[in-house]
Amino acid sequence: MSLKSLLTFCASFLAVVTSTAAAAEPGITYDCDTAANHFSELVLPAPAGRFTVSGAVQLNALAAVSKYAPLAHVWISSASQPGQSPASYAGVSVLALPADAEKNPTGSPAIQVISFNANGKEDEMLPLTMLAKPGGPQPFSLTFDGRTVAASVASEHRTFTVDAPAPVVRLVCSTGEFLFTDVKIQASQ
């Protein structure tokens, strides 16, 4: 084997090992816990070009509800000032509507609702998600191609137009504790 062939083989081997190791790395965990009528957010940078955000979100606890219902968002959005709503966004939400546990068929103190959200006007609640008992992880995936977000959650898929020349990934929760797990942001082609 020539030196050039050996170097080519070594470079190819390292590329495969590196990509396999990167694919096996766990994503981040964000335990988003807020008091009633408050919110918290984690804004993560996104790579240039096409990328996918994936992971799971689950409701762990409800705060005392007075004005706002407990909810969590996973959005790809335009950048905005801290605490300000983005001008353009799309993604998924998990909402927990308080309920009387004795009257709820699942025995839970909340009814979970999953929805798609986009730009404050294209929200779509997924009615069949209300049948599930809250608390289980809800896997999600959002892919941004520079113009649209393809969102998947609860075996449903939607596509939304998003104006975000410098996109960010936004994890938000309000009035409860939501656990975001294995959140990965991966560049794709």
Image (cartoon, rainbow, N blue to C red):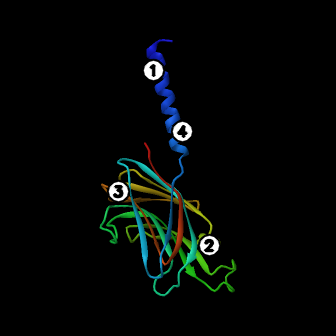
Callout 1: helix, strand or loop?
A: helix
Tell me the number on the disc at residue 31.
Answer: none
User: Label 3: how many residues lie within 10 Å, few (<14), some (14-19) or many (20+)?
Assistant: many
**In contact (CB < 8 Å): disc 2 and disc 1:** no
Is residue 127 shown left or right of residue 15? right
Tell me the number on the disc at residue 134.
Answer: 2
4 or 2: tag closer to the N-terminus: 4
Looking at the figure, which quarter contains the C terminus?
A: top left
2 or 1: tag closer to the N-terminus: 1
Q: CA distance from mark 1 to mark 4?
A: 20 Å
3 or 2: tag closer to the N-terminus: 2
1 or 4: tag closer to the N-terminus: 1
Q: Position of residue 107 (x, y in %)?
A: 69, 80
Q: Which residue is mark 4?
A: 20
User: Label 2: how many residues lie within 10 Å, few (<14), some (14-19) or many (20+)?
Assistant: many
| Three-letter amino acid code of the residue under disc 2 | Pro
Q: Is residue 147 above or below residue 130?
A: above
Tell me the number on the disc at residue 167.
Answer: 3
Callout 2: helix, strand or loop?
A: loop
- Residue beneath the point at 31% across and 67% down: 87
Tell me the number on the disc at residue 7.
Answer: 1
Residue 38 sits in quarter: bottom left
**In contact (CB < 8 Å): disc 4 and disc 2:** no
* Of residues 83 and 103, the one drawn nearer to the viewer in this rendering: 83
Callout 3: helix, strand or loop?
A: loop
**In contact (CB < 8 Å): disc 3 and disc 2:** no
| Three-letter amino acid code of the residue under disc 4 | Thr
Callout 4: helix, strand or loop?
A: helix
- Nearer the viewer's eye, disc 4 or disc 2? 4
